[in-house]
Image (cartoon, rainbow, N blue to C red):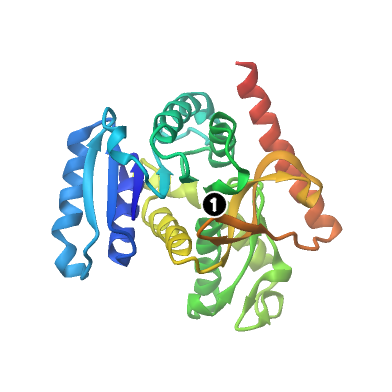
């Protein structure tokens, strides 16, 4: 079984290495507009195969070699312009929409039954663009969002409590951005509600920290994060390949769930060999539903602006 990663930048290269380390696919094709970059990263990852005890072959390709991606099980799209310092995810919309349309059309030509994981920013908008361009089942295309946001959220909770992050269970829904919604009712530490362990002010600080992490890393590194996104993608791929039916928050297309339509937002799903096996509709309270509606309206506004251009 083979998968393709489009975009050999920091995120693409890192997720390729994490997926290879899991030894769950036969071949990873790393495709980029710069064939030399793709080949160099692929070679470096393959050189580590003995150390990683993996037999997954990684091959670098140029953007004129889509035919070699034929019959890929999964296409992971990380390509696009990255945020510069001072640039928001929203400002990337027009530039990256052009790239997403080109990439998805080229790929689908050779892999009609593939699943698509969109990573390019702004994620919810780019997943919508790809979905409309591909005209495939909504269960076969989704955005990587929840695992990344949840990992960040949990890391700050672990820091505050000086505990093991593995003991934390949480759920974030909504936009992959400033209107993301941590669900405190679903946040526990070894079964203990977070509100019994931290004050409201500490929890609010953690929530704001989570929302600002992407921008904070951007200011420090002058580029977007890649380690946590890379392992988040790899975990999603593993859930699909192993058909493990993990419950994961993904940006997916809603057609009435949560009272919302024609929008991609992060909600919990069961992820398996067919992609989204089921969208889970939580019983949100009034405030949570209001916040999700706000998140939805923000995404729809950006989509409307894109369509007008």
| Residue at 74% in and 59% down | 281
| Rendered image quadrant of residue 67 | top left
- Find the residue positioned furthest to the right: 286
| Residue at 52% in and 24% down | 94
Q: Position of residue 125 (x, y in %)?
A: 58, 35
Q: Position of residue 276 (x, y in %)?
A: 59, 55
Residue bearing mark 1: 145
In the displayed structure image, the side of residue 97 where residue 255 appears, left or right: right
Q: Position of residue 211 (x, y in %)?
A: 58, 52
| Residue at 64% in and 76% down | 188
Quarter of the image with the N terminus is: bottom left
Q: Is residue 25 above or below residue 262?
A: below
Camera-side residue: 82 or 279?
Answer: 279
Q: Position of residue 288 (x, y in %)?
A: 78, 56
| Rendered image quadrant of residue 146 | bottom right
Badge 1 crowding class, 10 Å Cα cut-off, few under 14, some 14 to 19, many 20 or more, is: many
């Amino acid at each position: 079984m083979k998968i393709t990663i489009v975009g050999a930048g920091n995120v693409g290269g890192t997720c390729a290495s994490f997926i290879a380390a899991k030894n769950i696919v036969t071949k990873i094709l790393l495709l980029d507009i710069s064939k030399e970059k793709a080949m160099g990263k692929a070679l470096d990852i393959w050189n580590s195969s003995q150390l990683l005890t993996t037999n997954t072959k990684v091959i670098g390709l140029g953007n004129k070699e889509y035919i070699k991606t034929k019959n890929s099980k999964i296409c992971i799209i990380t390509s696009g312009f990255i945020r510069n310092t001072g640039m928001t995810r929203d400002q990337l919309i027009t530039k990256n929409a052009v790239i997403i349309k080109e990439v998805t059309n080229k790929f689908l030509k050779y892999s009609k039954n593939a699943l698509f994981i969109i990573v390019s920013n702004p994620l919810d908008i780019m997943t919508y663009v790809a979905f409309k361009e591909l005209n495939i089942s909504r269960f076969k295309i989704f955005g990587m969002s929840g695992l990344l946001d949840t990992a960040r959220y949990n890391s700050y909770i672990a820091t505050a409590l000086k505990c093991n992050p593995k003991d934390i269970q949480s759920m974030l829904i909504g936009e992959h951005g400033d209107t993301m919604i941590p669900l405190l009712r679903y946040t526990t530490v070894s079964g203990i509600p977070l509100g019994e362990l931290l004050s409201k002010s500490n929890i609010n600080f953690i929530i704001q920290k989570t929302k600002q992490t992407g921008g904070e890393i951007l200011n420090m590194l002058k580029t977007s994060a890649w380690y946590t996104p890379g392992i988040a993608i790899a975990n999603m791929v593993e859930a699909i390949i192993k058909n493990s039916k993990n419950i994961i928050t993904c940006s997916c297309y809603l057609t009435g769930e949560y009272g919302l339509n024609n929008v991609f937002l992060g909600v919990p799903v069961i992820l398996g060999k067919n992609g989204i096996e089921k969208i889970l509709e939580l019983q949100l309270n009034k405030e949570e539903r209001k916040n999700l509606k706000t998140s939805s309206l923000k995404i729809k506004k950006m989509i409307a602006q894109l369509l007008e251009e």
